[in-house]
Amino acid sequence: SEKVIFDTDPGQDDAVALLAALASPEAIEVLGIVTVAGNIPLSHTTRNALSLVELAGRTDVPVHAGCERPMLRPLVTAEHVHGPTGLDGPDLPPPVVTASPQHGVDFLIDTIRAHPPQTIRLLALGPLTNIGVAVAKAPDIAARLKDIVLMGGGYFEVGNITPAAEFNFYVDPEAASIVFASGAAITVLSLDVTHQMRATRERIATFRDLSNRSGAAVAAMLDFSEGFDVEKYQWEGAPLHDPCVTAFVLAPETFTGRAVNVEIETGSALTRGMSVVDYWGVTGRPKNAFWVRSGDADAYFALLAERVGRLP
Ligand code: BDR
Ligand code: CA
């Protein structure tokens, strides 16, 4: 099974990504969860991660708090999307377990160095601050990773927090830029594919119908997320972003894409955090990422429901 570390800012969609992975021990061994400030401040993302390992009955997985602000900029959050707790919707019990004392960035570096090269996959669901800092502190980890699979950016679908940028890259563009320049093998699940993954009423109902507590929690999370995004997009169902990362690890054959060069805008105020993707190969710049273009939405929701159905 694949050894992975999650870097995340839960967030309802982060939560579903984590739950699906925690439900799949035969395929994914979660070595740890590192939290980052993003959708909400770090204290909330850490508390939410702890609640989620408890919900999943997986308190054996350590949670490490990472960076509380982006590398160079003040934190921008998204309570307007995720609610004041970041995980509004379900009634999750307050966590009993506590976070591990080691800083998330040091956990990343030590864990990657302690394993043989090319064995760890880093699954990133939030702003890339922790990974940017880890690579700055320990550049050897980039080549040592098997790969980084991340949610962020957009080329055909461009932006969701500004007309030019997706939230995760917008919040910490310097970190995103460092990650794409690190030399690590990277797969990107951007808005181009996540906008195809819409949590319709019917799809949300399949989680509720699982009749376990995790299914009920996921349905309540997706009901909550729907409120904001459906109004914004006028689509039937809000896009479910971050679980694309877990689904890509579990079922890569349900996605298609191509190798491209990706660079991140850090200079401009207008296009801060924009992912500049050489999709048509016009620059000759080296290909530094696999850019996922589309995925099978029915297969995606079926996979997620099946996994969440395995949990308590
Ligand atoms: C990303 O931003 C966050 O709000 C979501 O959790 C996801 O990681 C989508 O742009
Ligand atoms: Ca996220």
Image: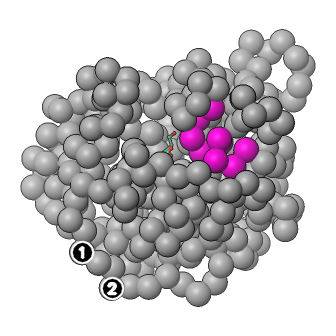
Seen in the image, is 78 located left or right of residue 130?
left
Q: Position of residue 157 (x, y in %)?
A: 55, 21
Magenta part of the chain: 165-173
Residue assigned mark 2: 96
In the figure, 3 relative to 58: above or below? above
Question: Which quadrant does the C terminus fall into?
Answer: bottom left
Seen in the image, is 85 located left or right of residue 28?
left
Instruction: Judge the density around disc 1: few (<14), some (14-19), many (≥20) Cα neighbours within 10 Å.
Output: few
Outermost residue, right direction? 284
Beta carbon of the mark 2 residue lies under 8 A of ligand 2: no
- What residue is drawn where x is 37% and y is 27%? 232
- What kind of secondary structure does the magenta stretch mostly adopt? helix
Cα distance in 3D space between marks 2 and 1: 9 Å
Residues marked 2 and 1 touching at CB (< 8 Å): yes
In the figure, 61 relative to 52: above or below? below
Seen in the image, is 179 located left or right of residue 56?
right
Residue 93's disc is 1
Q: Element under label 2?
A: loop
In the figure, 52 relative to 295: above or below? below
